[in-house]
């Protein structure tokens, strides 16, 4: 196999997989390039009754798989899990593959790495598994193998598919492969592999993957001996801005935590930050962030204190923050008025 840390020439972005031809293609392309909010809008339009009725069973399965991906990216694990029942009820090769991939992603989000591993490996044994839907199946399998004590097997799987990706000259798949290999084979210059993967993500036009790799590079650099270089903070600030703009709250929380490690505070993100919240959650947030206690918020809205606490706990989980103080910092002093 070629050295995975070596520089690479510019590689052509890959085309839309044949499976995604048709109505789902636009949403797939938006997810691939990292325009997540637009992808959400496109999927919502596809899933309206009049549109959903025109989708074939494979197209419906792919739309559900993309919806699971977007829900998990936004931190909406329960919503993502809610799609699994309807998805697994569909029959067909594409449908079964999509169901295994979605189930693996949801299990990983819940921290059930053994279940995630089994779903991803099952996906890899299915017909059509080599076709990249959202990500290659083995991209999920490798970290799941590592986290369940099967690091050597995970590293072998990553090396095998990195070699194939090198031959295919697909920058998106190769970037994912190098990221997985950096996780599984920490003896082979993981930082060098991540940097090459970041270059490839840029070539492929996938901004979300590029930002994820920036956060990986920053984390590994911060944890390494010595003082992080001056490029770390600007890299993280760009990632922070992108994650907030696109509503990727788990990623945003990770970036904010990394900024804190280098002595930098999160920047306020009022405005579109609230888009991910329900109207009821937004009402609670506005009052809580204005300085009212839970009891005062409950009295203002005519709800129970437990109801306020429940809404706030959901808000903290969605936004990836630990407390009311973090909420005020994140939203800033100027909150938009309620409609």
Image (tube, grey):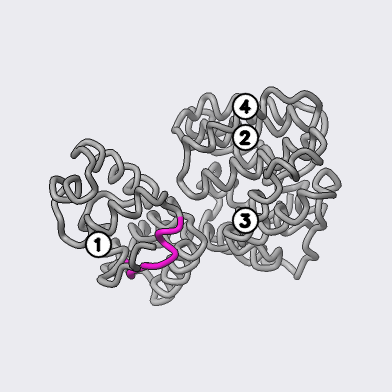
Q: Which residue is drawn at 67% across and 25% down?
A: 88
Q: Which of marks 3 and 4 is in front?
A: 3
Q: Residues within 10 Å of mark 3 (few under 14, many from 20)?
A: few
SS at circle 1: helix
Q: Distance between the residues labelled 1 and 4?
A: 39 Å
Query: Which is nearer the eye, 330 or 120?
Result: 330
In which image quadrant can residue 273 be found?
bottom left
Are the residues tagged 3 and 2 within 8 Å (C-beta)? no
Q: Are marks 1 and 2 in contact (CB under 8 Å)?
A: no
Residue 119 marker = 4
Residue 269 inside the magenta-drawn segment: yes
Disc 3 designates what residue?
A: 41
Question: Could you say whether the residue bearing mark 2 is in a helix, strand or loop?
Answer: helix
Q: Residue 186 carries which label?
A: none
**Distance between the Cα atoms at labels 1 and 2?**
34 Å
How far, Cα to Cα, is label 3 from label 4? 28 Å
**Inter-mark Cα distance, 3 to 2:** 20 Å
Instruction: Read off the residue under disc 1.
Output: 328
Residue 206 found in image quarter = bottom right
CB contact under 8 Å: marks 1 and 4: no
User: The C terminus appears in which quarter of the rendering?
Assistant: bottom left
Q: Are marks 3 and 4 in contact (CB under 8 Å)?
A: no
Q: In this view, does 35 lie above or below 117?
A: below
The one of 255 and 300 positioned closer to us in this rendering: 300
């Amino acid at each position: 196999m070629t050295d995975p840390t070596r520089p690479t020439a510019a590689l052509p972005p890959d085309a839309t997989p044949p499976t995604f031809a048709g109505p789902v293609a636009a949403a797939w392309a938006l997810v691939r390039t990292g325009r997540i909010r637009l992808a959400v809008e496109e999927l919502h339009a596809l899933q309206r009754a009049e549109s959903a009725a025109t989708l074939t069973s494979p197209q419906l399965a792919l739309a559900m798989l993309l919806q699971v991906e977007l829900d998990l990216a936004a931190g909406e694990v329960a919503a993502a899990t809610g799609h699994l029942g309807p998805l697994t009820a569909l029959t067909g090769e594409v449908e079964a593959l999509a169901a295994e991939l979605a189930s693996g992603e949801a299990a990983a989000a819940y921290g059930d790495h053994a279940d995630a591993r089994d779903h991803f490996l099952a996906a890899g044994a299915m017909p059509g598994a080599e076709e990249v839907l959202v990500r290659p199946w083995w991209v999920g399998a490798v970290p799941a193998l590592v986290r369940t004590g099967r690091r050597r097997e995970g590293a072998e799987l990553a090396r095998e598919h990195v070699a194939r990706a090198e031959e295919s000259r697909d920058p998106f798949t190769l970037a994912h492969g190098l990221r997985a290999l950096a996780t599984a084979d920490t003896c082979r210059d993981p930082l060098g592999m991540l940097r090459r993967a970041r270059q490839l993500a840029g070539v492929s036009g996938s901004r979300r993957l590029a930002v994820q790799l920036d956060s990986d590079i920053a984390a590994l650099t911060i944890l390494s001996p010595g003082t992080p270089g001056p490029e770390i903070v600007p890299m993280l600030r760009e990632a922070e801005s992108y994650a907030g703009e696109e509503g990727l709250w788990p990623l945003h929380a990770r970036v904010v935590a990394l900024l804190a490690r280098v002595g930098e505070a999160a920047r306020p993100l009022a405005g579109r930050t609230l888009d991910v919240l329900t109207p009821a959650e937004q009402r609670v947030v506005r009052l809580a962030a204005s300085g009212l206690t839970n009891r005062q918020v409950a009295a203002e809205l005519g709800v129970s204190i437990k109801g306020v606490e429940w809404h706030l706990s959901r808000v903290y989980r969605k936004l990836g923050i630990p407390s009311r103080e973090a909420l005020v910092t994140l939203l800033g002093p100027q909150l938009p008025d309620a409609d």
